[in-house]
Image (cartoon, rainbow, N blue to C red):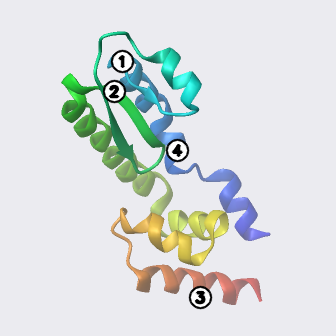
Amino acid sequence: MQTQQITASVKNLYDYIDELQNKLLADNGAFFATPTAWAQKQKVEGVSYVGLKTLLSGCVLCPADNASELDEKLKCIRQTAIAYDLAKNGKDGVIQREIAEAGLYRAKVVLKEYGITWGELLNVATTQFKNAV
């Protein structure tokens, strides 16, 4: 019950970056590379595209001319969102949310980028379990 309340009230990283990321992509002529038929319609004839792997959203196709600048801006948005997420929800809140949404081992992968260690994750998980019993 307590975990459900936490996840309902705590936004996740997607919530923080979605609008900024979508605006950045649109401003740079980039778009998500799914599905293939849709992506082909988005391409501008004569423009060379490259794929950028984003950690949250899969692959983005963008004009090759501004790929490295776009990649740096996407990383900046992500790091800013992580810092905001931690400041707004606290480390324990973020850990609890990720455990509830993804499970312990998937949370470990997601939270590595946050600088959260396996030990910190286990400590919160153990406390959650003790409080639930």
The quadrant of the picture occupied by the N terminus is bottom right
Which quarter of the figure has residue 45? top left
Q: In this view of the protein, which residue sits in the foreground, 115 or 2?
A: 115
The residue labelled by disc 3 is: 126
1 or 3: mark nearer the eye: 1
The residue labelled by disc 2 is: 62
Q: Marks 2 and 1, Cα distance to the nearest angstrom?
A: 6 Å
- Residue 116 on image: x %, y %: 38, 72
Task: Tell me if 120 is positioned left or right of 106 in this view.
Answer: left
Disc on the earlier residue, 4 or 1 = 4
4 or 2: mark nearer the eye: 2
4 or 3: mark nearer the eye: 4
Residue at (35% x, 16% y) in the render: 27
Mark 2 touches mark 1? (CB < 8 Å): yes
Q: In this view of the protein, which residue sits in the foreground, 32 or 46?
A: 46
Q: In this view of the protein, which residue sits in the foreground, 127 or 67?
A: 67
The residue labelled by disc 4 is: 14
